Amino acid sequence: MLMTANKKANYIDDLIYKELSYKTVGCFYNVYNELGPGFKESVYQKALVIEFDLQGVPCHEEKRISVN
């Protein structure tokens, strides 16, 4: 189901961290546009960590969490 323009605008307005969300999605596109399709997930993950660092987006690579 595609979002209508009105719903999409409301979705963006409701984001808590608009700037961080915008930068994060931009990093995803930069990595994909640079590498293209066909790589294993681990390749994209490593490239994304590098891109986040270049763009000043804080991240933790494969941080362990406790599940109860």
Image (cartoon, grey):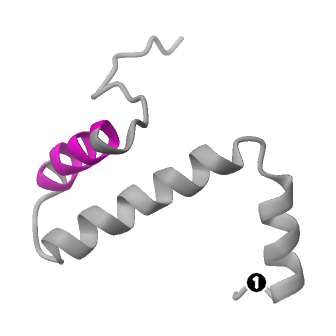
Residue 51 colored magenta?
Answer: yes
Residue denoted by label 1: 3
Which residue is found at the position 42% from the left and 29% from the top?
58
Quadrant in the rendering for residue 33:
bottom left
User: Residue 55, position in %: x, y?
Assistant: 37, 44
Relative vertical location of residue 52 with respect to residue 27 in this rendering, above or below: above
Which residue is found at the position 77% from the left and 63% from the top?
12
Residue 66 colored magenta?
Answer: no
* 41 vs 9, nearest the viewer: 9
Query: Quarter holding the N terminus?
Result: bottom right
Q: Which range of residues does the magenta coloring cover?
A: 43-53
User: Residue 46, position in %: x, y?
Assistant: 16, 44
User: Residue 48, position in %: x, y?
Assistant: 26, 48
Quadrant in the rendering for residue 61:
top left
On screen, residue 2 versus residue 51, left or right, reads right
* 12 vs 56, nearest the viewer: 56
Q: Secondary structure at mark 1?
A: loop
Which residue is found at the position 70% from the left and 50% from the top?
18
Which residue is found at the position 85% from the left and 59% from the top?
13
Task: From the image, give the main secondary structure of the stretch colored magenta.
Answer: helix
Identity, as a three-letter code, of the amino acid under mark 1: Met
On screen, residue 52 versus residue 13, left or right, reads left
Crowd rating for badge 1 (residues with CA inside 10 Å; few <14, some 14–19, many 20+):
few
